[in-house]
Each structure stands twice: as C-alpha cells, then as structure tokens.
Image (cartoon, rainbow, N blue to C red):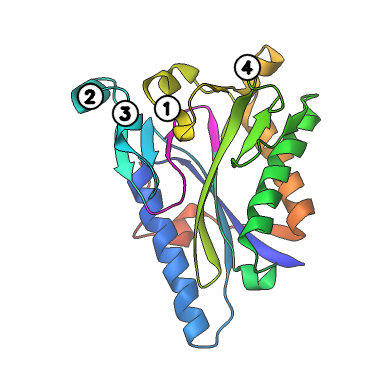
Amino acid sequence: MQKVWLTHLGTKAYKEVWDLQEQLLQQNVQRKSRGEATQHHLLLVEHPPVYTLGKSGKKEHVLISDDERIAKGIEFFQINRGGDITFHGPGQIVGYPILDLEHFKTDLGWYLRTLEEVMIQTLAHYGIIGGRSTGETGAWIEPEFPEKARKICAMGIRCSRWITMHGWAFNVNTDLRYFDYIVPCGIKGKAVASLHQEVGHELQMQEVENVMLAKFAQLFNVVFESLSKELLLPISITKK
C-alpha cells in the first residue's frame, strides 16, 4: 500500500497551483535521477473561474472574445496537459494527483480508467449511474444516449518519467452557465452536468470530497496522510 500526501489548498488561483504541480513533479524526477524514493501527492483545490486549454485543443472552442471573458472575470491558460478546453471554478472538486506510476502500474490507460472509476463510484454513492463515453475521457451520465449524455467530470493529465500531474474537475455545485461560453472538452452537442443538478439540491463539498477520497484510496490501494499547505512548498503556496 502506497502513502499519498494529501493537501487541501482551499481556493487558489490556477497558475499558482499549476506552478506547484510542476515543482512537485520535477522534485520527483530529480529524486529518480539520484536513485532516491519518490513521494506521492494529491492536491485538492477550488479555483476562481478559469478556462484551460490542453495541448491538442483549439482556441476557437472559446466562444466569447477575450474582452468578454475578462469582463466576466474568467482567466485563461493554455497548458501542457492532454485534452481540449475545460472550465474550473467554484463548486468543483479539482484534484491533482502527483503519483509515481512505477509504484502502481506503468499504463496511462489504466490510470485514466481508474480515475474515472473513482468518479463513477462517487456518483453511485448518490444513487446516480455514471459511465464512460467511448473514445472520450471523464465521467458521464447516460453516455449511451447521445441526446441525453452529459459530462460531470472532466479529466486531463500529463506524465513525465511516469510521474503524473493535472487531473480532474468534478462538478458538484458548479454554475454550469460558464460552460455556455466554450465547447466543453471540444465535444459538440453534449451537455454538462453537476451533482447539484442531478440530485436536485446543493451538497456539502466536504461530504462529497470525503466520499471521493474513500473511493480513491480503495481503488488505488493507498493511505492518505495530511500535509499542511504551509509545509508543502511555502514559496509557492501562501496564505491570503
């Protein structure tokens, strides 16, 4: 069983947490090069409104101008994960695992399918049948019916020397109107969902997070140990 350092970052700007992920990944790469043990981390965070565009994404999948986006208070970053355009914002559980897959399984397909299974089992806890959409990543509801299919969790990863970064964005109480201004994940004609929308009432974020962490621990066979954000990388994460 592997130990994963779990850090709750609260609400943090996207770029600050992206930089932190990069530092943790590079620390692990350097440890490997010296023959030292790597460390697994899971960062949990909520971001202020931001669109992120993956390496293979198309900027035209942002359907509003830069001026309109800025006026709505939405940041934008083109980043080094796979996938297309997605939204991060309040009411989401965003998770960034920095795992050394050499201690799990050196198979990115397995890694993504296992992350998806975490989300599918989290949905099942709330009586919602989740699934996968053929040829697409993330967790979906009713993916077998194109006219009803809706995505509740987006995923995109990067991996270097089997060290992962980036991760998932699970819509809990998310304001879905932010998705109206993009083509989510570059997929046309399919909707986006939130847990709030599906169960008909707002949920406690901590409760959903606890369910998700339990599923993650079970499926990845890990134990979590809390690590204060002040102790993680003080230069990168500062109190507001």
**In the image, residue 209 lies at what x, y percent?**
65, 37
Q: Residue at x 59, y 68 (%)?
A: 100
Q: Earlier in the sequence, mark 1 or mark 2?
A: 2
Q: Earlier in the sequence, mark 3 or mark 2?
A: 2
User: Residue furthest toward the left?
Assistant: 67
- State how far apart marks 3 and 1 are (Cα): 15 Å
User: Residue furthest toward the bottom?
Assistant: 35
Name the mark on residue 74: 3
Mark whose residue sits in front, 1 or 2: 1
Range shown magenta = 80-93
Rendered image quadrant of residue 19: bottom left
Mark whose residue sits in front, 3 or 2: 2
Question: Which amino acid type is marked by label 1?
Answer: Val
**Residue designated by label 4:** 147
**Residue designated by label 1:** 183
Q: Badge 2: few (under 14), some or many (20 or more) residues near its Cα, within 10 Å?
A: few
